Structures are given as structure tokens and as C-alpha cells.
Image (spheres, rainbow, N blue to C red):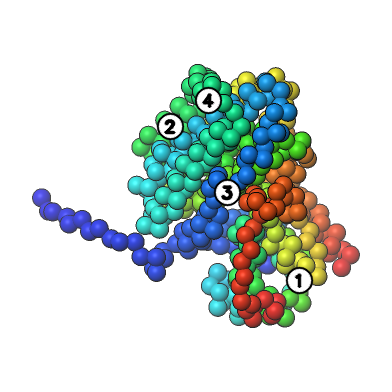
Amino acid sequence: MFDVVYFSSISENTKRFVEKFGLKTVRIPIKTDEAANFVYEAENVLVVPTYGSGEEKTTVPKQVIKFLNNPANRKHVKAVIATGNTNFGSSFGLAGDMVAQKLGVPLIYKAEILGTPDDIETIKERLEQLWLTR
Amino acid sequence: MEKTKLITRPINWNKIEDQVDLDVWNRLTQNFWLPEKVPLSNDIQSWETLRPHEKKLTMHVFTGLTMLDTIQGTVGATSLIPDARTQHEEAVITNIAFMESVHAKSYSSVFSTLTSTAEIDEAFRWSEDNPHLQKKAEIILGYYNGDDPLKRKVASTLLESFLFYSGFYLPMYWSSRAKLTNTADLIRLIIRDEAIHGYYIGYKYQQALAEESTTRQEEMRGYTYDLLLELYENEIKYTADLYDEIGLTADVKKFLHYNGNKALMNLGYDPLFPKDECEVSPAILAALSPNADENHDFFSGSGSSYVIGKHESTTDDDWDF
């Protein structure tokens, strides 16, 4: 199965979300320079929280951008999952759309805050499906 | 007795203790808005298409929301300042409090644009006489004035992330029927602010809770679900009181469940309401997320989907993805 590579700020909402997947999780460092040097070379799904409110520049956490600047990291991301809040309207989970589009991989789910049990079920099913058809 | 000397420290934004404080400050200030920027007068014609009971409902809903924003601006948010962990948190809370006052004032802008003094006075009298609205205020104010900092944070998060939504439903409903669309733009700006407020206060709650004993943590978990249910019971009555006549109570309840779950998640807890009780009508969800091209008046509008153009130099990061 895929590993889960994720970024979570010190509020740890995304951390608690991905821990419910029951998969191996790997956290992108919070310090930007460490994130830039962080390498992960196993097939994974990238989980990215959405920041800001539609200001493109700050929507994707800068640590995730630094991580993806390394082609070795990009190569192993097979799908993207976004977290966010529908209160932000059309920018809900926008970081997921942006990253998935740049990487040319599917955005398989958008969840809110910590994700509900139903969100987790759906994500597990979709990951399973993607793993079998990869 | 030994004398301790109190030292007053000026806030130093170049020395950040908690990065979340700075991030949230930046997001809130980037999102700053005033009701004067929303072209509410474009809704005058649309307002006249509403039936008398629909107008009255809308005004009651908005005075109810004004009440919550008033409480949050003058009592709720400011009651969190003495418990702040950092000076930057204190500063963020002053921004939250001020924006709540902007929200409260923005409903008055809607009223003065669309309706008459007599009708406005009636709506405000209603807010003083409605037992469910008064009860809602009483429950929340009880905790704000109490002496438990954690309970204050829970009450504040539930207000920001749950209690507003029986009211927010109606402008989204009108917007889905192409009515009062500029007012809906204004409400979306409020909804966006409340998301950040709920996230931030919920985060500070979880930070403080992590330092407590297991017993205390369990007590707070129980308290949170109990308070949500106490508010929920009252909210159901309030909702029925407002929406029965127009036949929307069942759908509003789903919206309440959906947002109740999100309020719990902001506090770090698991959702309470099962999925099939949270299936909000797709029209309402669509109204919450207008596409950027659905601007009602592009040239004068400053709605939630309208972003003022900015230019910026490109950086290596833009191209080295």
C-alpha cells in the first residue's frame, strides 16, 4: 500500500487526520530549510492542508512547495488528498487542486478539518482501488 | 511579604513564540473587509420580491445573528484575553473582537439599505422578546462570565462554529434562488472569518488542554458534548420558531448537524452527528461556494469571490515546482 506523506502545522489537525488512515505516515518537516532537504522515495499519497483564503501565493504551505521542488520527491507522489474548510467557499481544499494539477496526479478527496469517519472510509476505498490499478 | 515587581512588556512581533499566532494574524488582516465595500443596494429590487413573512423572517434571522456578533465582539472574544498564552495571541484576539463588531454592524447596513426604521425597530424588539434567542445568549454568557478558561474557549468555539449557522442558512437559501445575492456575498465574508476564528480558538483550547491531567481532559470532553447538546436542543426550538412557516426546518437542522460536527473537530473531538443527518441540500452547499465567475456586479462588486488585483514579482519557486 501507499505510504502517506503529509504536512501539518503545529496545530496538528492534518496529523490527526492522516493517523486515521491506518497506513505508514511520514511528516514533512515544519522548518522550511529541513523541508527543502527532506527526501522520501517510496510510492505515496500526499496530504496537503489549504492555507489562506484563495491568495494563490499562500494557499499551498511553503514546506510542501520546498518538498516538491525536489524531482526525486515528485516522482513518488501518486495521488493527492486535500484538507480545508467549506467556509472558504470556492477555495475549499484549493491547495489539493493546485498540487495535483502541477504533478499530473489525481486529487482523490477533499476533507474538512479532521475528517469524519465516512471521509476516512471513502479515502481508504479510493486508495485501495488506486493501489490495485497502479 | 515579598514584593514582586510587575514588568510591562511591549509586544515584539520579531520574536514569535507560536507561529500560528502570526499565521492567523496575517490571514485575518488579509481578509479584512467592511460592509461599505459590498454593493448592498443592488438587492433592493430583489428584496421587494419577497413576501411579507419572508421579509420578516429575514430580519429576525439577521437580528439573531447581530445578537451573537454583539456578544462575541464585546464579551466573548475579549474574555479570552486574560488567558492568552502569548502577547501575539492577545493581539489576534483584539482583531477577532473588532471583526465581530464589524459583522454586527454589517447587518445594520443590510437593514438600512433594504427596509424602514419601523421594521428595523420591530425586528430588534423581537430579538429581545424571543425566548430561544435569549436562552442562547444566556447559556453562552454564563460561561463567558464564569471562571474556567477552558470552558470559555469551548463556548466561544461553539458560538463561532455552530450557533451562527441557523442564521447563515437563510441568506444562502435566498442566494440559491438568486435573491439577495449581494447580501449573500457579505454573509460569505462573515462565514470565512468565522472559520478562522473557530480554528484559532479551537487550537488554543487544544494547546491548553494538552497540559491538563487525564481526569480533567475527560471532564472537558464530557462538558463539550454536553454543552453542544444543550445548545443544540435550544437551537432546534429556535430553528422551528423561525423556519416552520416557510417549511425549511428539516433542512436547516441538517445544516446545524453538519456545522456542529465541524465545531467539534475544531476543538479536536470526533463528530457527533451521523452522515445521513448531515446531508445538507446541494443548493445550499453550492451557494456557499460560488464560482469566481459568478460575480453579480463585477465592476463595483467586492464580494467574497472578487479579489482585488495585485502584481507580484515571480520567484524561483514559481517555476521550479
Residue positioned 68% across, 67% down in the render: A5
**Percent position (x, y) of residue B106?**
54, 40
Which residue position holds label 4? B117
Q: Nearer the viewer, mark 4 or mark 2?
A: 4
Q: Is residue B38 above or below residue B29?
A: above
Q: Quadrant of residue B35?
A: top right
- Disc with the residue nearer the chain's start (3 vs 2): 3
Which residue position holds label 3? B37
Q: Nearer the viewer, residue A104 or A130?
A: A104
Disc 1 is placed on an element classified as helix
Q: Nearer the viewer, mark 4 or mark 1?
A: 4
Tag shown at residue B141: 2
Viewer can see residue A71 = yes
- Disc with the residue nearer the chain's start (4 vs 3): 3
Residue that lies at the very extreme toward the left in this rendered image = B1
> What's under tag 4, amino acid-wise?
Thr
Residue positioned 50% across, 20% down in the render: B125
Question: Label 2 marks which chain's residue?
Answer: B
Which residue position holds label 1? A102
